[in-house]
Image: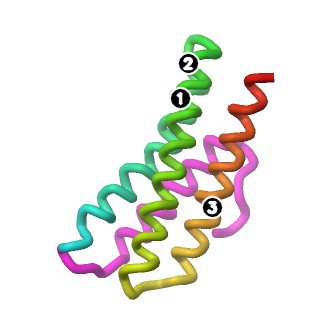
Amino acid sequence: MSEKPFDIKHRCYQFSKEVIQFISTANYDRIYFSIFDQLLRSATSIGANVVEGKSGSSLKDFKNFYTIALKSSNETKYWLCLIRDTISMEKDKIKDLINEADELSKIIASIIINLQK
């Protein structure tokens, strides 16, 4: 991934685009379809929940949506690791995506923790 946006919602959006592009160029057997479908759903859910949280009507809404975004980010890492370990494909690209999902998890978790202070 190239230069990363500072704003979390833009960074999540960029990550979603990267995952979509990765999936669109991947060649895999039908048995793996549901794994890639789950990856697509969880990766795009991160940004969607961040955007929802930012437009929430209360601090509780904000925190709830960010908590869901964190869970989606962790789920995304799971699917990427499963793909990495079961399918022969671009290991460097998968590694980059796993690293970005991990960074997003850390940023979102930090935001949630700071809300509790």
Q: Amino acid at mark 3?
A: Glu
Return the x and y of residue 10 as percentages of the image width and height: 62, 46
The residue that label 3 is drawn on is: 100
Q: Residue at x 54, y 25 (%)?
A: 64
Residue at the right extreme?
117
| Amino acid, disc 2 | Asp
**Which of the two labelled residues, at mark 1 and mark 3, occupies the earlier sequence position?**
1
In terms of sequence position, does the residue under pointer 3 or pointer 2 come before the other?
A: 2
Q: Residue at x 25, y 62 (%)?
A: 34
Find residue 101 and report its image quarter: bottom right
Decide which of 41, 20 is in the foreground and name it. 41
Give residue 33's quadrant in the image.
bottom left
As drawn, 9 above or below 51: below
Q: In the rendering, which numbered label is found on residue 61?
A: 2
Extent of the magenta region: 1-30
Residue 72 lies, in percent from the top left, at 48, 46
On screen, residue 6 above or below 88: above
For the residue labelled by badge 3, is the local secondary structure a helix, a strand or a loop? helix
Q: Is residue 41 above or below residue 68?
A: below
The x, y position of residue 13, in whole percent, is 55, 49
**Is 11 in the magenta?**
yes
Residue type indicated by callout 1: Phe
Tell me, yes or no, whether the two marked residues, 1 and 2, touch with CB atoms within 8 Å: yes
Foreground of the two, 57 or 14: 57
Q: Tag 2: Cα neighbours inside 10 Å, few (<14), some, or many (≥20)?
A: some
Residue ID for mark 1: 65
